[in-house]
Image (cartoon, grey):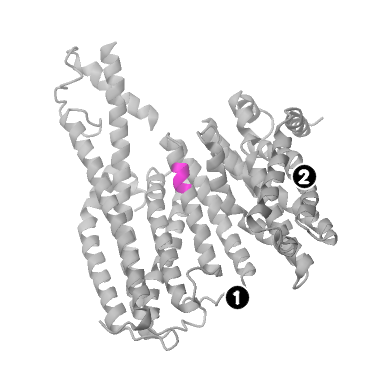
């Protein structure tokens, strides 16, 4: 690295601030992304999934315990999703 | 291309495919840019070594403005074409734009201290950047204040367009207010007045920042799509529990 | 009476009879201007120098204080929904309500400015021009504030959010408004170019702001 002259502290400082800020932004972005993906996987593990994720309906651990009829239970959330979007 | 991306699932698989390549590109460009900025670029004959701050300051300022442009275009997408990803794109871009604006402000003030002898002068360009930062803060605050995503997206789109119309007026009035400012020197009709030896590192760093913006923007868009899915699923889960319980 | 005029008269009457509304804005204006010398010192030369800027900034804050009322009451009690389905287009409704805000807030504040100017040692011969710039600039203040009011309709802490959204947009109004007055007091140059710019900004916001406000009202009422 060349000699940065009398203002070296300002030059290094500017680069440090820029890279720390952008680094923090990157870390936060990646962390949020991971977090949402983890929650989604967790929900899917519980058997709650999107209508369009076409998979055979897995038995619902929590929801269908008291009621055996899956078909009606399956339809409801799909309609609820549609009205919102 | 843009319309075929309207399907969020297709968009997500595209993001997954692009992210590794984009990450590699960012690393390479940033590495090259830093090498050029510190080891190859000669000191400026007037500003000396301090000119090296330009290689982070100016690209950050470019990206700060470019990011608002992305938000404004996405706002048109939300209000006119009702593209389903437009408001996701705008929402994901705002914090990134605010960060780039903040970086431009801080590096500008660190550049100003050796050059002008003070950390802050009400120079036209710095002042415009400050106002841009305030506009970003307003956008982010509006998004956080409205809970319903549909209304939040449309309200933020309207605010973004109002801001986009105002930015040239603000810029003009600030320039008029502070006529002491130096003329823009990179993008001029008669060609750049900066020496090419200083220009190459500037453009490489600019490309690096632009690639970083694209990477972060895609990631943040993916996060936002996933967040909405989670929100929808959790709501159906609650409705479901209520239904079953009843 | 045309529907537009009827709505305008109704809004002005409501603002007038509500009491408080106009009085609070004027009182706030007085308080802000009155405490500033305690922060700056009683040096009359300094105060005269910065008086136009202080009066303008205080005016913006006082006008914003009442801005979230432009649509709020009508939104709460459902009048806005009736107006939206009525014979007038929504941008027209937004324009009339902004105009009512200007008549009941902008004009009183502008007329009070010279009185406060006395406290700040503002030269007497600059006062007519100051009032003129404020009368020319406050339409932009009211109409742009209506955008913020419609965007933050029904939200928690809407007043604070409104100020955060709208104040940056007032930078041009502030610059040209203050420049006109200070050009007249200390120079250098003619006060008319910035005054004409101020008029241009006001006219543009009278035309454009109701469109944005109406779009925002639609998102809020959906």
Image height check: is A54 above or below C29? above
Which residue is labeled 1 in the image? Answer: B180
Which residue is labeled 2 in the image? Answer: C107
> Is C15 positioned to the left or the right of A58 in the image?
right
- Residue at disc 1, secondary structure: loop
Q: Residues within 10 Å of mark 1 (few under 14, many from 20)?
A: few
**Residue A29's spot in the image, x, y percent?**
29, 51
Q: Nearer the viewer, residue B170 or B16?
A: B170
Q: Which residues are magenta?
A: B139-143
- At a point 57% along the width and 39% down the height, the residue shown is C159
**Residue C33's spot in the image, x, y percent?**
70, 50
Outermost residue toward the right in this view: C125
Q: Nearer the viewer, residue B175 or B234?
A: B175
Image height check: is B164 above or below C64? below
Q: Chain of mark 2?
A: C
**Residue C180's spot in the image, x, y percent?**
74, 63
Q: Which image quarter: residue B29?
A: bottom left
> Is A22 positioned to the left or the right of C192 in the image?
left
Image height check: is C186 above or below A47? below
Image height check: is C42 above or below C145? below
**Callout count:** 2
- At a point 15% along the width and 28% down the height, the residue shown is A56
Residue B76 seen from this side: no
- At a point 76% along the width and 48% down the height, the residue shown is C110
Instruction: Indicate yes or no whether the magenta region holds residue C193.
Output: no
**Residue B116's spot in the image, x, y percent?**
50, 77
Q: Residues within 10 Å of mark 2 (few under 14, many from 20)?
A: some
Q: Main secondary structure of the magenta part?
A: helix
The N terminus of chain C: image quadrant: top right
- Residue at disc 2, secondary structure: helix
Residue B244 seen from this side: yes
């Amino acid at each position: 690295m060349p000699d940065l002259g009398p203002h070296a502290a300002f030059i290094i400082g500017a680069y440090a601030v820029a890279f720390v800020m952008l680094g923090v932004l990157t870390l936060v972005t990646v962390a949020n992304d991971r977090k949402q993906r983890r929650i989604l996987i967790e929900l899917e593990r519980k058997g709650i999934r999107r209508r369009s994720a076409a998979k055979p309906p897995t038995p619902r651990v929590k929801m269908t315990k008291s009621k055996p009829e899956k078909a009606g239970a399956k339809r409801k959330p799909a309609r609820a999703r549609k009205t919102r979007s | 291309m843009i319309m075929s991306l309207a399907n969020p699932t297709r968009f997500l698989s595209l993001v997954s495919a692009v992210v590794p390549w984009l990450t590699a590109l960012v690393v390479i460009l940033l590495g090259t840019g830093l090498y050029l900025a510190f080891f190859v670029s000669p000191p400026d004959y007037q500003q000396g070594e301090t000119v090296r701050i330009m290689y982070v300051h100016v690209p950050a300022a470019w990206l700060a403005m470019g990011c608002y442009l992305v938000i404004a275009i996405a706002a048109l997408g939300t209000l006119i074409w009702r593209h389903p990803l437009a408001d996701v794109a705008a929402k994901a871009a705002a914090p990134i734009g605010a960060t780039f604006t903040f970086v431009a402000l801080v590096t500008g003030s660190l550049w100003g201290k050796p050059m002008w002898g003070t950390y802050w002068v009400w120079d036209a360009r710095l002042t415009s950047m400050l106002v841009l930062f305030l506009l970003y803060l307003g956008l982010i605050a509006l998004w956080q204040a409205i809970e319903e995503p549909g209304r939040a997206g449309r309200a933020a789109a309207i605010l973004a367009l109002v801001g986009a119309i105002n930015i040239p007026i603000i810029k003009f009035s600030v320039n008029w207010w502070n006529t002491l400012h130096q003329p823009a020197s990179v993008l001029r009709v008669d060609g750049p007045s900066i020496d090419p030896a200083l220009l190459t590192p500037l453009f490489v760093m600019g490309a690096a920042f632009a690639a970083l913006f694209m990477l972060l923007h895609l990631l943040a868009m993916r996060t936002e799509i996933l967040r909405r899915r989670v929100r929808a699923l959790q709501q159906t889960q609650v409705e479901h529990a209520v239904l079953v319980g009843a | 009476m045309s529907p537009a005029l009827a709505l305008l008269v109704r809004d002005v009457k409501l603002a007038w009879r509500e009491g408080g509304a106009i009085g609070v804005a004027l009182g706030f204006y007085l308080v802000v201007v009155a405490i500033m010398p305690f922060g700056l010192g009683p040096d009359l030369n300094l105060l005269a120098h910065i008086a136009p800027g202080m009066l303008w900034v205080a005016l913006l804050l006082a006008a914003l204080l009442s801005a979230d009322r432009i649509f709020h009451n009508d939104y709460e009690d459902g009048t806005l929904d009736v107006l939206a389905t009525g014979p007038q287009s929504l941008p027209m409704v937004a324009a009339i309500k902004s105009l009512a805000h200007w008549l009941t807030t902008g004009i009183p504040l502008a007329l009070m400015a010279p009185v406060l100017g006395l406290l700040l040692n503002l030269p007497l011969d600059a006062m007519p021009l100051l009032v003129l710039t404020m009368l020319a600039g406050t339409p932009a203040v009211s109409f742009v504030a209506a955008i913020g009011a419609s965007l933050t309709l029904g939200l928690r802490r809407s007043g604070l959010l409104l100020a955060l959204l709208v104040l940056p947009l007032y930078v041009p109004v502030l610059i040209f408004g203050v420049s006109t007055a200070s050009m007249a007091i200390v120079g250098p140059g003619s006060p008319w170019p910035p005054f004409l710019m101020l008029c241009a900004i006001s006219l543009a916001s009278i035309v454009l702001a109701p469109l944005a406000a109406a779009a925002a009202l639609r998102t809020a009422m959906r």
